[in-house]
Structure formats: C-alpha cells, structure tokens
Amino acid sequence: MADEQAFDLEKIRELITLMDEHGLSEISLSQGDQSWKLRRGATEAVPMISAAPPQAGGAGGGDDQPDEPTIPTINSPTVGTFYSAPSPDDPPFVKVGQAVSPDSVVCIVEAMKVFNQIQAETAGTIVEVLVEDGDAVEFGQPLFRIQPT
C-alpha cells in the first residue's frame, strides 16, 4: 500500500516531457485517492516589469560580448495573450528599430478579458520582437529586446 502512495519519479518526468511537447502549463490527474497536479511558471506572483533579463541564465557575461543575452528585455508582467497592436486592423505599437521612451506602450497582454497595456519602462530602441501576435505568454517571459539609450 505504501508503494501506491509514493511518488513515481519516472512518471513525473514523463508528464513534464508531455507538458513541454504540448506547451501545457498545468496538468491535473487523479485516480482513486491519489491526485497529482503539475504546474510550470509562477502561479500568483506580484507583477513586476524588469528591463534587465532576470532569468537570462547567468550573470556577469563580459561587456565585451555583444551577444543577444546581454541585451535587456521587456518582460510580461502577467500571464495572458500577447497582442502587438490595439486591434487586428491597426499597425503594431512598436517595430524593430523604433525608439521608445519609458512610458511608450509596446504591446497589450490580455488576461481574462482585461487588456493590460505594457510600457517599455526604459528608453531605448527595439531590436527584436520575441513573441508572435496571439501567443500565450507567461509571467516574466521576455517579449522584446531593447537596446537602452
């Protein structure tokens, strides 16, 4: 009976692999008295916007390295759907090569029918758009790369 209640690490790994393959952020399973719930990403975190990539995978990449990881990002402050323009018929808020100020709206992230305008939070030039219009985004996910001015 103790074996039935113990976690099977291999099954958990398989579920994580399936989540990755299918882009799932949550899986809930139950059978009998056993229930599993796996969730990726933040669940209920305080929204924060950072111009620097906090989860870029390592700090201290030298200043002499002009690689993309050293370029700051504009991150999603919430989970939702990314929209590059106010409506499908309108042009995008920003394009690659466009200069922005800290209060420039760069996109909208819609969550539960609430449309959140996302501001650049820093002055600079948009160098890359990292997500597609209509993509689901996670809390803290980089949306744009910006070269500060």
Image (spheres, rainbow, N blue to C red):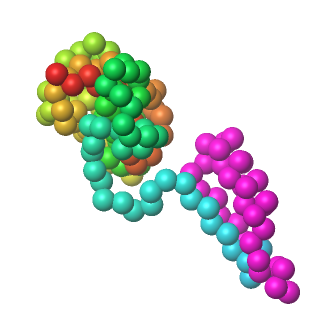
The residue located at (82%, 85%) in the rendering is: 2
The residue located at (26%, 37%) in the rendering is: 51
Q: Can residue 64 be seen by looking at this rendering?
A: yes
**Pick the front one: 107 or 125:** 125
State the image coordinates of residue 77 (x, y, percent, origin top left): 32, 47
Q: Residue furthest top?
A: 97
Q: In this view, does 24 lie above or below 4?
A: above
The residue located at (57%, 59%) in the rendering is: 39
State the image coordinates of residue 31 (x, y, percent, origin top left): 77, 74
Q: In which quarter of the image is residue 93?
A: top left
Q: Is residue 18 above or below residue 124?
A: below
Q: Does the magenta stretch include residue 9?
A: yes
State the image coordinates of residue 9 (x, y, percent, origin top left): 75, 64
Which secondary structure is most common in the magenta stretch?
A: helix
For the C terminus, give its image quadrant: top left
Segment tinted magenta in the rendering: 1-30
Q: In which quarter of the image is residue 45?
A: bottom left
Q: In which quarter of the image is residue 68?
A: top left
Direction from residue 102 to residue 1 in the image, left or right:
right
For the N terminus, give its image quadrant: bottom right
Direction from residue 44 to residue 101 in the image, left or right:
left
Direction from residue 74 to residue 28 in the image, left or right:
right
Q: Is residue 28 above or below residue 131?
A: below
**Pick the front one: 23 or 5:** 5
Number of numbered discs visible in the structure rendering: 0
Q: Can residue 80 be seen by looking at this rendering?
A: no
The residue located at (69%, 74%) in the rendering is: 35
Q: Is residue 104 magenta?
A: no
